[in-house]
Image (cartoon, rainbow, N blue to C red):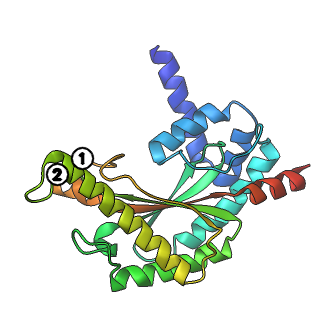
Amino acid sequence: MKTKIISLLLCVGMIVACNNTQKGAAIGAGGGAVLGGIIGAIAGNTAIGAAVGGAVGAGTGAIIGHKMDKAKKEAEQVQNAQVETVTDNNGLEAVKVTFDSGILFATGKSALSATAKTSLAQFASVLKNNADCDVAIQGYTDNQGWKNSTVEQSQQKNLSLSQDRATAVSQYLLSLAVPATQIKSVQGFGDANPVADNSTAAGQAQNRRVEVYMYASQKMIQDAQNQAN
């Protein structure tokens, strides 16, 4: 059992060490779907991806990996954004952009701050430059309760706040001429999927966030398949 675990970690490490183009080719070549899911579970949310029929080939994965390399480099120029590579439902490379809600919003509020608008204006340009990427926007909170509220009431308030914040980000991006057809989902998850320890103030701050995923659209996948063939 230990040998299997060590082998698996070595495989994951080898893929993480590659750039997106190399990883896309490795995943598309077959057998990478399992490793892709593991990487996604470690690095971010895997519940994204265009609905496509059948496996994606190595050549297609490499082409999409190259596109995601470009999108990631552009996103890394956005102020107050944490950018990383994740894997989508199709085993393809995607880009996860995280905005700290402390930068975006006042405590308990969903109105965007001036700093947020500056960062999102930069990010809107990235989205428009990569129009063949689909987008998912997800809001999260910490698990702290609300004053004079039961646990259940606090959970519902956190869920509503996370939805309102995700919606605020989406609406502002739309106001900056990001195509409505590009944003495929906008959802709040409350205190689900924490990325840090909620028992500490630092962990709570990390869990209060909005995540934006850029992933391959059906058109990008089809174009890449045509180019690979």
Asked if one can make out residue 143 in the rendered structure from this viewpoint, the answer is no
Relative to residue 182, is residue 59 depicted above or below?
Answer: above
Q: Residues within 10 Å of mark 1 (few under 14, many from 20)?
A: some
Residue name at image x 83 percent, y 58 percent: 223
Residue 35 vs residue 113: left or right?
right
**Label 1 residue SS:** loop
Q: Mark 2–mark 1 contact, CB under 8 Å?
A: yes
Asked whether 135 or 14 is in front, the reply is 135
Q: Report whether residue 137 is seen.
A: yes
Q: Residues within 10 Å of mark 2 (few under 14, many from 20)?
A: few
Q: Quadrant of residue 129?
A: bottom right
Residue at horizontal 17 percent and vertical 57 percent from the top? 201
Measuring from the top left, give residue 173's x and y in whole percent: 52, 77
- Picture coordinates of residue 140, whole percent (x, y): 35, 57
**Snapshot quadrant of residue 10:** top right
8 lies left or right of 59: left
Q: Which residue is mark 2?
A: 200
Q: Amino acid at mark 1?
A: Asp
